[in-house]
Image: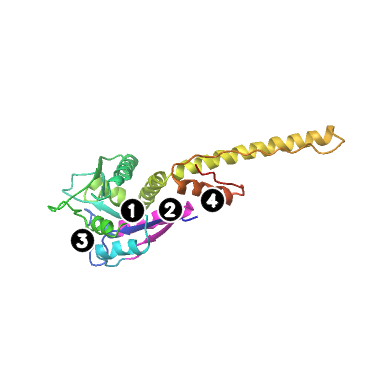
Amino acid sequence: MRKIRVVIDPGHGGEDRWNRGPTSYIEADGVLKVSKHLKKKLEESGHFVVKLTRDKDETLSRKQRAEIARDFKADLFISEHTNAFNGTAKGTEVYYSVKRSKDLSIASKMSRAIATQFDTHNRGAKTRLTRERDDYYGILYYGALYHIPSILLIESLFHDHVQEEKILLAEHNLEKLAEVQCEVIKDYYGINEEESRIKKMEEERRSEIIKGEGKDNKNKETNSVGPAREKLYRVQVGAFRQKENALRMIEALENDGYPTYLVSPK
C-alpha cells in the first residue's frame, strides 16, 4: 500500500542565519533539529515516507524548497520555523495557504496542540496575503502553485522571547515538539484511530486464543472420540468513507498475520 509522502522543510539555513534569540538560539539550527526528529517519528510509525529539503546548513530558495516537495510528490509539505517580533510576544501560530482552505483544520489542531504542550498562547491558524490576495509566504505560494495537496508553515514559539528561547534551547523540548506535530499529522490522516482499533483487535485476539486453548485442554481430557469441531468467525473491523483509510487498515492487519478482505459499497 502507498505510504503518505511528507516533505519537511527546515526554514532558513546557509547564508540565512540572522534569526536568533537573546542568547544563543539560532532558528536555522533549531528547526533543523526539530525536522530531523519529526522525520524519524513519522517514519517509525510505518505509515509515512519522509524527505527533508535540507539535512545540513545550506542555502535554498523558497522556490527550490517547494520544487523538492513537488518532485517528491508530497501529500503534505511542512515548513518549520520559530517566530520573532518585539521580545514580548509569545505563542504558536500556523499558516496555511489561501488556496488550501481545507488545511484550516490541521493548522488549527497543530497550533492548539503545540501551545498546549508548552503552556503558551495559541495564536491559531492563519493566512497572510499580498495586496494581490495571494499567499504572502513563498513556501505557501510555491507549494500551491505546484499543486501540493496540503501545505503548512509552522511558527512553533517565539525565539526572541526570553522564556520561550529557553524552551527551544533544550534538546528534549525540540524532540517533544516533533512528537506533538507527529501526533497531529497522524490524527489528520486517521492513523491514530486505526492503530487504536488494531490494538483492541490484537487484545481480543489474544483473549480468544487463551480461551480456545483452555477449551482444547478440557476437550482432550473429557472427549475420547476425537477433537472438538473448530469454529471460524469473520469480524468486521471498520467502515471507512475513504478507500485509502480502509487499505491502510488492511495493510496493518496483514502485516500482523490476519487474513483480510475488502467489501466495497455497490
Going from N to C along the chain, the mark reached first, 4 or 2, is 2
- Give, as a single range, the part of the protein colored magenta: 29-56
Which amino acid does the dot numbered 1 rest on?
Pro
Distance in Å between CA atoms under marks 3 and 4: 46 Å
Q: Quadrant of residue 142?
A: bottom left
| Magenta span contains residue 229 | no
The secondary structure type at the circle numbered 2 is helix
Q: Nearer the viewer, residue 216 or 261?
A: 261
Residue occupying the far top of the picture: 222
Distance in Å between CA atoms under marks 1 and 2: 18 Å
Q: Nearer the viewer, mark 3 or mark 2?
A: 2
Q: Nearer the viewer, residue 4 or 207?
A: 4
The secondary structure type at the circle numbered 4 is helix
- Label 1, residues with CA under 10 Å away: few <14, some 14-19, many ≥20: some
Going from N to C along the chain, the mark reached first, 1 or 2, is 2
Would you name the residue on which mark 1 appears? 149
Tags 3 and 4 touching, CB below 8 Å = no
Distance in Å between CA atoms under marks 1 and 3: 31 Å
Which amino acid does the dot numbered 3 rest on?
Trp
Distance in Å between CA atoms under marks 4 and 1: 23 Å
- Viewed as shown, does residue 172 lie left or right of 222? left
Which amino acid does the dot numbered 2 rest on?
Leu
Q: Nearer the viewer, mark 1 or mark 2?
A: 1
Which of the labelled discs sits on residue 12, or is there none?
Answer: none
Going from N to C along the chain, the mark reached first, 3 or 2, is 3
Distance in Å between CA atoms under marks 4 and 2: 17 Å
Residue occupying the far right of the picture: 224
Which of the labelled discs sits on residue 18, or is there none?
Answer: 3
Would you name the residue on which mark 4 appears? 251
Question: Residue 211: x and y, percent?
Answer: 69, 35
* Visible residue check, residue 168: yes
- Viewed as shown, does residue 151 lie left or right of 3? left
